[in-house]
Amino acid sequence: MSDTLLTAWKGAQGRLKDARIDSPSIDARLLLEAAAGVSRTDIITDPYRPLSPEQSAAYEAFVERRLKREPVSRILGRKGFWKIFLNVTPDVLSPRPDTETLLDVILLAFPPERAFEMIDMGTGSGAILLAALSERWGARGVGTDISTEALAVARENAANLDLNGRCTFIRTDWGAGFADHSFDLVVSNPPYIPTGDIAGLDPEVREHDPHLALDGGEDGLKAYRDLAPEVARILKPGGTFAVEIGWDQGAAVKALFEAAGFSDVIVVKDLGDRDRVVTNGPDPRTNPIPA
């Protein structure tokens, strides 16, 4: 007797839970949707729909990969971020919900009616830049990266989202090559994991995210030492910067940007109440975000 959508989902959910996989229910559902070509609504409204042998085989292969700690985003080749979906490959960091704290800051600092120029340094998949452009139609932007492969992924994502007319992607080191005072907004999610901590990361991260996007040097702060003076150089007077940080790096990164000449620098917490963003912009936890 063949599996139905419901029995397949529940069976995989139990196996993932036994293996201590985070969010087993969500992971099992996402893999089922892809393997069987169904939607979340289909699973709920037509739970006894049988799977074909080909669908069952595809689902089993997906679940086996997840049991080996391969992230769902790597198995499916795509990941949701903010309100958009992005293609992801082994050449780019898989975007995480914590990074959406940057979007909270951006949308509060730049209301819908304002046109502005932004740069996303170390853009990877283009997640931050493309999410911002999708929300602020008066914005234009540049994404930079030193990885040619990552830039190819970002360009593809921009085209898929029909945003390629408002952004460009350039291979360069941070903001090298751009004139002083070029941008109203400068953002970055740089590598910030101390080199010695990488071996202890979860397998989903350690074995599947590019170490180039993880390794922040001996103390995790190397990128910020490079970024702070570069941000000060390319940001327009009165402009806003926002950088993602590790949960224990708020004070150190704030001090680096203050030493680069910025005032009114704050540390913004994420939804888990952990330090996540250093910025000279507004704090979204104490201000409403414009629609």
Image: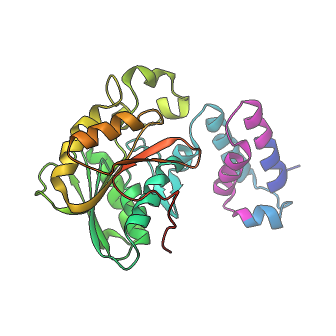
Residue 4 visible, this angle: no
Q: Residue furthest bottom?
A: 113
Q: Is residue 49 left or right of residue 197?
A: right
Residue 223 located within the stretch drawn in magenta:
no
Q: Main secondary structure of the magenta part?
A: helix
**Residue appearing at x 53%, y 50% in the figure:** 97
* Residue 203: percent from left, percent from top: 54, 29
Total number of numbered discs in the rendering: 0
| Nearest the eye: 228 or 39 | 228
Residue 152 percent location from the top left of the image: 31, 53
248 is higher (above) or lower (below) than 75: above
Pick whichever, 81 or 110, lies toward us: 110
Residue drawn at (37%, 76%), measured in percent from left and top? 137
Residue 177 seen in this snapshot: yes
Vertical placement of residue 238 versus 78, above or below: below
Query: 59 and 165: which one is in front?
Result: 165
* Relative side of 152 to 277, left or right: left
Residue sitting nearer the eye, 32 or 212: 212
Task: Identify the image quadrant of residue 273.
Answer: top right
**Residue 240 point in image, percent of width and height:** 30, 59
Part of the protein shown in magenta: 13-40
Residue 239 located left or right of residue 61: left
Kindly identify the residue that appears in the image at 43 percent across and 65 percent down: 108
Q: In the orientation shown, which residue stands out farthest toward the front? A: 264
Residue 186 is left or right of residue 82, and the answer is left
Q: Quadrant of residue 209?
A: top left
List x then y, in percent, for residue 70. Answer: 57, 36
Q: How is the image coloured?
A: rainbow
The answer to if 21 sits in the magenta stretch is yes
Instruction: Answer above or below: position of 140 versus 68.
Output: below
